[in-house]
Amino acid sequence: MPRTGFADLPLHGGKAPRWLFERMVRLSGDILAWMVEEIGPCATLKRFSDPFWFQALGCVLGFDWHSSGLTTTTCGAVKEALRERGDLGLYAAGGKGAASRRTPREIEEKGERAGLGERIPSLVHASRMSAKVDSNALQDGYQIYHHFFLFTSSGDWAVVQQGMNEENGYARRYHWISSRVRDFTEEPHAAICSDAGGSPVLNLVAVESRETREVAAQLSSRRPDKTLRELERLLSLDLPRRHQLLLRDLHPESLRKVLLSTYERQPEDFAALLGMPGVGAKTLRALALIGELVYGTSLSWRDPAAYSFAHGGKDGHPYPVDRETYDASIDFLERALRASRTERSEREAAWRRLRGFLSRPD
């Protein structure tokens, strides 16, 4: 059978062809079923926080190793597979674009079906805060457009989200795992991978920025006029190029309404400030730069991306997908799963018979 795949099929916006996506759904479902059976749902969930494992999963499913679409398509296939496999104890929400905005509602709906009850609000909070951090508190030049939230029936969660840099055309992927997060606003990531930087990075979730976070919360709780006067003074100074780039789109009058809102609500700390509606990257940047330049607080410019994968073209590398081999892999896994379930049920029945025999009176 001739091999056909990416080389002879159109890829609209980096999406997999329908025939391939359907196979990705089946294969990812079989892989997850195997993993849950072997290591359990929590350990399976944790694998999604490992960027190398996630990249390998996308490649096994057949997507281009060097495409930004690997992230969105792999997450889409996993979500679709889990839709029909409630017995695994794994649930997926979110996705790309409009789907990401439906994440809280999906968590609530699936959390109710999973019987999570009182833990649902904390899952919704985790989804919102992870998105807020990577959109606003970590200002690295990548705009978040994909948010994938995976959780278990025991309340553990993982996040895989991705941003795009319009200037260099590269993507950056952010991995989170609940077991690692002690504080959403200080070193919360399990991993961040990216191939290209270039933009100034304002890292408000670095441990070095702790003083600045505290001062930013204090500045947001005072009357806006003084804070805005300090910003106007900074805008008039001849500052280093990095600071000029970060200050250039900050306009005191456009920030006045937001700062008035924070003054009225008095956020008790940086996490509360970050979670407030209307508080975005520009507000946080203004408060951080005022804290650093006026009050002398420490501020991190460290780019936290520690892993590198190519996120470029979508042209069938390293080779087109072989449909025959792909289908054979799915068939093998499904037959193995069925056999494993049969063997397990037979083993359990044998143990029950043995226990019954041993418990009989002499």
Image: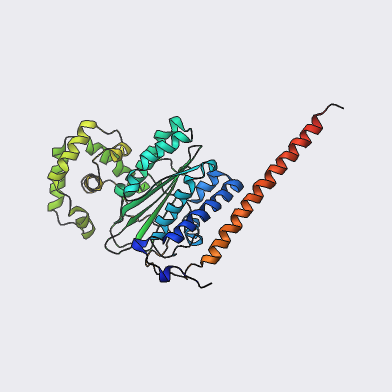
State which quadrant residue 198 falls in.
Answer: bottom left
* Image quarter hosting the N terminus: bottom right
Left or right, 246 with reference to 187: left
Judge whether 190 appears above or below 311 on screen: above
Looking at the image, is 239 positioned above or below residue 271?
below
**In terms of depth relative to the viewer, which is nearer, 213 or 109?**
109
Task: Pick whichever, 86 or 266, lies toward us.
Answer: 86
Left or right: residue 154 compared with residue 189: right
In this rendering, does residue 185 appear at all? no
- Colour logic: rainbow
**Relative image position of residue 351 (x, y in whole percent):** 74, 38
Answer left or right for 288 relative to 206.
left
**How many discs mark residues in the rendered view?**
0
Residue toward you, 161 or 87? 87
For the point 50% across and 56% down, which residue is it? 53
Q: Looking at the image, which residue sits at the far front? A: 1
Q: Quadrant of residue 267?
A: top left
Percent x, y for residue 345? 68, 42
Indicate the position of residue 244 as horizontal and vertical percent values: 19, 56
In what quadrant of the picture does the C terminus appear?
Answer: top right
234 sits to left or right of 359:
left
- Looking at the image, which residue is at 63% across and 54% down? 336
Q: Residue furthest bottom?
A: 2
Q: Position of residue 279 (x, y in %)?
A: 24, 42
The furthest residue to the top: 361
Any part of residue 235 in sight: yes
Rendered residue at 28%/58% (across/down): 200
Position of 19 relative to 2 (above/below): above
